[in-house]
Image: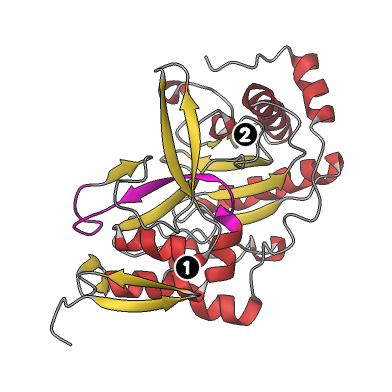
Amino acid sequence: MAKDAAVELAVGDRTVRLSSPDRVYFAARGETKLDLVRYYLAVGDGIVRALRERPCMLHRFPSGVAGQKVHQKRVPNGAPPWLETVRVHFPRYGRHADELCVTELAHVAWAVQMSTVEFHPWNSRRADTEKPDEWRIDLDPMPECGFDTVRRVAHVAHEVLDDLGAVGWPKTSGGSGLHIYVRIEPRWGFGDVRRAALAFAREVERRAPEEVTTTWWRKDRDPKKLFVDYNQNARDHTIASAYSVRGVPEATVSTPIRWDEVDDVEPRECTIATVPARFAELGDLHAGIDETAYSLETLLEWADRDGLEAEEP
């Protein structure tokens, strides 16, 4: 095969053409566009489960991750007829977008052909895009906050979830933090889900006041603390999905983990080179995430108690 000649990949019942397969996307180990799509095929069940039926923003890197990043909401003209989309509206701007809606692995491979590295889905599904079914807990360390603090706060968050009777599904962020996802009943709008997330964050802060902040403005936060970023639950806010690669030279992956791995996981070791073998051994650690949905009623009672507002500041 000539260098950079296109290749055709069989993905389920589809054939996906991959142009420039030898283009280097990740400089740390010289991994290519073809390496990237092979990674996503290796974790296929996991990435499809994480994205299924959700509007999805694509973070594209046409020249590799050292180049410009493009945030793409709209599926471009000329997409294959088997690609699925969902229309979402942006009332503030009077616009809408037909976003990718993954229902099969070929949709993911097509997105990689379009130079997508990161997948950022909404926390709602196309059946009702205004009613989230996923609550996202983003443990975001400030610049002088070490990962040992992230580990400790994750355990505090786990304790609060246990007290609520909710099941949390942790994963590395692919960066310096951790994410925890909770399936919720799709009964509430984004404002109430965000308000519930803030009530949870405040409870974590009460239990670990020396290490946690919920201060909204970044300039006002203690740089040694961890911010529980409740605003990731606001409408049209997205974070990298489980199994999404991150746009960094090391090709790190936002990787599902077990709770008993929190104290030992090294996020920088979770990459497109290592996660496929882990997936082959352990399967998708988020495979059971859809089995139970949690009610937000208790958290909303906490929010009422604390006088928390639904809207963003």
**Secondary element at image label 1:** loop
Q: In this view, does 246 lie above or below 313?
A: below
The residue that label 1 is drawn on is 270
Whether residue 174 can be seen here: yes
Element marked by disc 2? loop
Q: Which residue occupies 72% across, 46% down?
A: 183
- Coordinates of residue 90 in the picture (x, y in percent): 46, 24
Of 178 and 273, nearer the camera is 273
Nearer the viewer's eye, disc 2 or disc 1? 1
| Residue behind mark 2 | 210
Q: Which amino acid does label 2 sit on?
A: Glu
Q: Which amino acid does label 1 sit on?
A: Cys
Indicate the position of residue 276 as horizontal and vertical percent values. Answer: 50, 77
Q: Which residue is drawn at 50% across and 73% down?
A: 275
Quick one: 214 or 233, which is closer to the camera?
A: 233
Q: In this view, does 129 lie above or below 268?
A: above
Q: What stretch is highlighted in magenta?
A: 50-68
Q: Which of 253 and 50 is in front in this view?
A: 50
Instruction: Identify the residue shown where x is 30% and y is 74%.
Output: 34
Q: In which quarter of the image is the N terminus?
A: bottom left
Q: Is residue 300 magenta?
A: no
In screen coordinates, is 97 left or right of 212? left
Q: Which of 145 and 52 is in front in this view?
A: 52
Figure quadrant of residue 262: bottom right
